[in-house]
């Protein structure tokens, strides 16, 4: 189950990173975060294709890609209450290091054979 949660968080991260790359300046902090997430993604996909049905991993990946895209599109359009944005992209960018940490930790636990 942790594998699929990590897979969804990976797609969410990459959609946020793509929007950030188009709107903001790329700093060294984001380059380090992107590198850590890329290595985590490689390990998660390698684990998924070797330990799960490849067709299931492909279908679930496509679904998670679509869900993440719709979530980020909703944030870009804006969620407003009384003319004030409830959650903006700037808040998402501030919390991106926490998402990076969560992805790296989940990928370590999800891909380890002797977890608990």
Image (cartoon, helix red, strand yellow):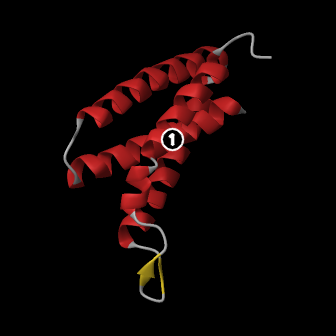
Q: Quadrant of the N terminus?
A: top right
The residue lying furthest to the left in this view is 25
Dot 1 falls on a residue whose secondary structure is helix
Looking at the image, residue 81 lies above or below residue 58: below
The residue lying furthest to the bottom in this view is 82
Give whichever of 52, 105 is nearer the camera: 105
Find residue 112 and report its horizontal and vertical position in percent.
66, 14
* Total labels drawn: 1
The residue lying furthest to the top in this view is 114
Give whichever of 101, 12 is nearer the camera: 101
Find residue 94 and report its horizontal and vertical position in percent.
41, 51
* Residue at x-position 61% and y-position 29%: 106
Quarter of image, res 69: bottom left
Find residue 75 and report its horizontal and vertical position in percent.
42, 65
Residue 27 appears in view: yes
* Residue at x-position 48% and y-position 23%: 40
Quarter of image, res 8: top right
Give whichever of 5, 64 is nearer the camera: 5
Q: Quadrant of the C terminus?
A: top right
* Residue at x-position 30% and y-position 52%: 19
For residue 5, side relative to residue 28 (left or right) = right
Looking at the image, residue 70 lies above or below residue 51: below
Name the residue carrying label 1.
98
């Amino acid at each position: 189950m942790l594998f699929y949660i990590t897979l969804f968080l990976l797609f969410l991260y990459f959609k946020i990173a793509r929007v950030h790359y188009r709107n903001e300046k790329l700093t060294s902090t984001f380059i380090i975060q992107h590198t850590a997430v890329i290595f985590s993604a490689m390990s998660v996909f390698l684990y998924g294709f070797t330990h799960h049905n490849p067709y299931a991993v492909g279908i679930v990946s496509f679904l998670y890609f679509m869900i993440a895209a719709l979530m980020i599109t909703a944030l870009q359009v804006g969620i407003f209450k009384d003319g004030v944005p409830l959650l903006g992209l700037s808040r998402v960018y501030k919390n991106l290091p926490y998402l990076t940490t969560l992805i790296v930790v989940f990928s370590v636990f999800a891909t380890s054979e002797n977890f608990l």
